[in-house]
Amino acid sequence: MIFSRFLAFSLLSLSTLVLALPTPTLNDREGLDRRYHEDHRKHHPKVHESSRPSASPSGIVRRKVQVPISTVPVVLGAPEDLARCPSQQIACPISPMSLAEVQTVSADTPYECITPQEDLYSCGGCATLGTGQDCTAIPGVLSVSCAVGQCNVYSCKAGFTLSSDGECLPNIFDYTTRP
């Protein structure tokens, strides 16, 4: 009886530990783009891909509701951007923009709402505007997270060493190969 309880407790502890480990990330641009588009499709399905039932019989014919758009242009990435995103989030353009392009943004500009304090791909601000950082794009990073607007590196790829200030530095000497 005691052994079975000990075994159950050990398995529960082990599963909790495994689930708490940070997951490795891909740093190549293609992998990042693929993950972004997969995530975007999951959270923004097309009309015919939606798993929710439609109010109209066919699911295709709908009356378009005209949403009034404010006459004041809303700057993407601004903390006071409450017209586009919920509280604690900011609107970031989907594709990178220059400062001149941001000044001429229209209501048609595609954007996403992010939480800059914890978003892995826009940590600390909009990565597409240059105010935030894509934690997964840090060279040599294997496992990373975003907390309080800062990227936290947990481990590095082979050939890199985690420094005391949380950076992945390339190994200068590789002792595994001999001449």
Image: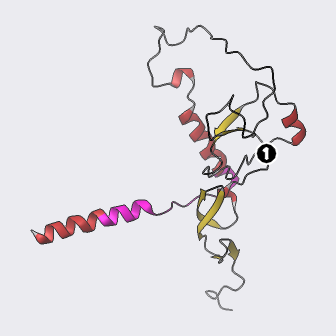
Residue 28 lies left or right of residue 43; in this view the side is right
Q: Nearer the viewer, residue 40 or 92?
A: 92
Task: Examine the image and state in which quarter residue 101 appears.
Answer: top right
Q: Which residue does the numbered mark 1 point to in the structure image?
A: 129
Q: Position of residue 88 (x, y in %)?
A: 62, 41
Q: Is residue 149 above or below residue 173?
A: above
Q: Is residue 171 above or below residue 75?
A: below
**Residue pushed farthest left?**
1
Q: Position of residue 74 (x, y in %)?
A: 78, 30
Q: Position of residue 137 (x, y in %)?
A: 69, 58
Q: Is residue 20 magenta?
A: yes
**Residue pushed farthest bottom?**
179
Q: Is residue 90 above or below residue 165?
A: above
Task: Examine the image and state in which quarter residue 110 appears.
Answer: top right
Where does the C terminus fall, quadrant-wise?
bottom right
Residue drawn at point x = 65 percent, y = 71 percent? 166
Where does the N terminus fall, quadrant-wise?
bottom left
Q: Is residue 87 above or below residue 69?
A: below
Q: What segment carries the magenta color? A: 13-31
Q: Nearer the viewer, residue 74 or 105?
A: 74
Residue 9 lies left or right of residue 28; in this view the side is left
Residue drawn at point x = 68 percent, y = 71 percent? 167
Q: Position of residue 51 (x, y in %)?
A: 45, 25
Residue drawn at point x = 54 percent, y = 61 percent? 24
The amino acid type found where label 1 is placed reads Leu
* Colour scheme: secondary structure
Q: Is residue 58 magenta?
A: no
- Judging from the image, what secondary structure is the residue with disc 1 in? loop
